[in-house]
Image (cartoon, rainbow, N blue to C red):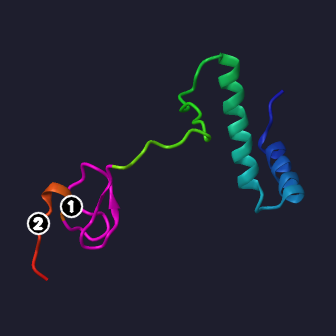
Amino acid sequence: MDLGPLEILVVLAVMIIIFGVGKLPQIGGALGKSIREFRSASRGGDDGDPPAVDEAAPPAARSTNEFCTQCGVAVTPGVRFCTACGRPVGSAAVSQPQ
């Protein structure tokens, strides 16, 4: 049993009438996600999704953060320049006269 172009157009017209044009992208995305999850479950393998992160676990302590001397923004350890103002930070910092 094959679907011809006329049958596909009728199905699309009915979908537009029932759901409206605004909901069709959301429905298509949900349908695609459901199909991917079904295929993954039927194969029994991992499809490359990252493992779930436990929300209750506290984040790692960031007591080693440095702060930009110019704008005061916290910068991650190991970076040489502030992402906000572009000035050197940490051991690469050079005091410049104001």
Along the horizontal axis of the image, is 56 left or right of 76? right
Residue 25 at what x, y percent from top left?
Answer: 71, 54
Query: In which quarter of the view is residue 92 placed?
Result: bottom left
Name the image quarter holding the C terminus: bottom left
Q: Read off the residue under disc 1.
A: 89
Crowding near the residue tagged with mark 1, few <14, some 14–19, many ≥20 C-alpha atoms within 10 Å: many
Residue 88 at what x, y percent from top left?
Answer: 18, 63
Residue 36 at what x, y percent from top left?
Answer: 66, 32
Would you place residue 94 above or below residue 50 in this image?
below
Would you place residue 46 above or below residue 74 in this image?
above
Along the horizontal axis of the image, is 83 left or right of 60? left
Query: In which quarter of the view is residue 57 placed?
Result: top right
Label 1 amino acid? Val
Q: Which residues are magenta?
A: 64-87
Name the image quarter holding the N terminus: top right
66 in the magenta segment: yes
Along the horizontal axis of the image, is 26 left or right of 84? right
Residue at 30% in and 73% down: 71
Residue at 32% in and 69% down: 72
Residue 95 at what x, y percent from top left?
Answer: 11, 70
Q: Read off the residue under disc 2.
A: 94
